[in-house]
Image (cartoon, rainbow, N blue to C red):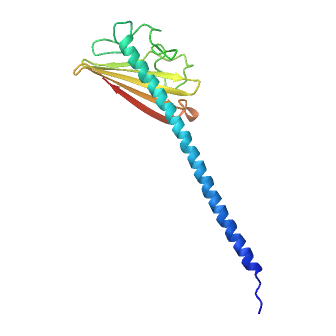
Amino acid sequence: MKTNPRGFTMFFAALVSSLALAIGMAIYDLTVRELQVTSMTAQSQYAVFAADTGAECALYWDFHYNGTGSAFATSSASGNPTVGSVVCNGYNVYANGTPPAVYLPPTSSTWTSWIVTANANAATTTFYISFPENDRCVEVQIAKTAVPLTTIVYSHGFINCAGAAGGAPQLERELQVSY
């Protein structure tokens, strides 16, 4: 009795093809995931850069405002400088410090000066800086306490500030500076 080897050849060819397809799909899936991680890493770095810009701005104006000290509120001072006197990255922070809704692009003419919350022992100044050319922004809070005398700068850098259809930003990184 003679057996037909054609069935075995076809089975073996299908098995090898399936194995090659599975390996190809696994490599494709791994490549796609690696590209996503790489993209997220780059975006994370941009959020850190935005946060660093905000922190550096706050540190500069905390020590160099009109040569007399801080531009920001303390428990004994309001922290309301003259309009146009606090500028970071070419952006007038005091005049354009607070959007009516968080993360709006800086083209809005309805922004107001920065937010100050104060009591007898502490004060917090909050402002925003937008970078419309690359859709990044930063929210900066400068918290000053009288006893003990401390300053903490919280700088939150965001990516995609306008968000999808006006939603929340997609990525945030925070830096904190204490002194």
- Is 58 situated above or below 27? above
Furthest residue toward bottom: 1
Tell me which residue sits at (40%, 14%) in the image: 61
Horizontally, residue 51 falls left or right of residue 144, namely right
In the picture, the quarter occupied by the C terminus is: top left
Q: Position of residue 74 (x, y in %)?
A: 30, 15
Q: Is residue 48 visible?
A: yes
Furthest residue toward left: 147
Tell me which residue sits at (59%, 24%) in the image: 133
Q: Position of residue 10 (x, y in %)?
A: 74, 74
| In the foreground, 101 or 67 | 67
Q: Position of residue 159 (x, y in %)?
A: 52, 32
- Is 138 situated above or below 92? below
Tell me which residue sits at (60%, 57%) in the image: 26
Tell me which residue sits at (57%, 23%) in the image: 132
Q: Looking at the image, how many numbered discs can be counted on the residues?
A: 0
- Is 118 situated above or below 3? above
Q: Is residue 170 visible?
A: no
Horizontally, residue 123 falls left or right of residue 166, namely left
- Is 178 situated above or below 11? above
| In the foreground, 129 or 44 | 44
In the picture, the quarter occupied by the N terminus is: bottom right
Q: Position of residue 76 (x, y in %)?
A: 27, 12
